[in-house]
Amino acid sequence: MDTTSSGTVLFRNTMRIADGHLDGFRRAIAQAVAFAQEHGPQLMVEVFIDEERMPAHSFQLYRDSDAVRTHWRLSDPYIREVMEHCTVQHFEVFGEPDHDIVAALKTPGGESFPFTVSPRLAGFNRLAESGRG
């Protein structure tokens, strides 16, 4: 079994859905995830919503920083649509992305949001394995 490379990057985005925007958020997220599944470089995308308190959590796993750059280039219209319905409360980066990725997080669209970067210590994944029951 291979160990996950140190280039692996995991994003956790915690968003606050705006009042009255749940349906719009759901539509925009569904379109964004469908696009990412078809065209994006992500190894995994999962989105969760707490409808009672209205936060949403998005997890995205990337092979490396090049995959993050590709995602941002391809998905910009979808990201903008999602952001019409929410605000970023906190963004967590797990891994060691390139410096330009971290710099881009500091001022997306001219606005800053809180984020942290936690370097990888150890791990593995089985995403490339098939036939496991």
Image (cartoon, rainbow, N blue to C red):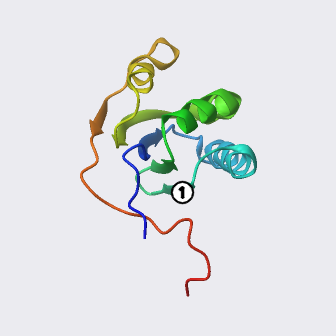
Q: Mark 1 belongs to which amino acid?
A: Glu
Place residue 112 in its image quadrant.
top left
Is residue 7 found left or right of 62 in the rendered image?
A: left
Q: Which residue is mark 1?
A: 46
Q: Position of residue 60 (x, y in %)?
A: 50, 49
Q: Is residue 84 visible?
A: no
Q: Residue at x 54, y 35 (%)?
A: 68
Is residue 37 found left or right of 97 in the rendered image?
A: right
Q: Position of residue 119 (x, y in %)?
A: 27, 42
Q: Is residue 94 above or below residue 97?
A: below
Is residue 11 found left or right of 122 in the rendered image?
A: right
Q: Position of residue 116 (x, y in %)?
A: 28, 35
Q: Residue at x 38, y 20 (%)?
A: 106
Q: Residue at x 68, y 46 (%)?
A: 36
Q: Is residue 7 visible?
A: yes
Q: Residue at x 40, y 51 (%)?
A: 5
> Looking at the image, which is closer to me, 88 or 63?
63
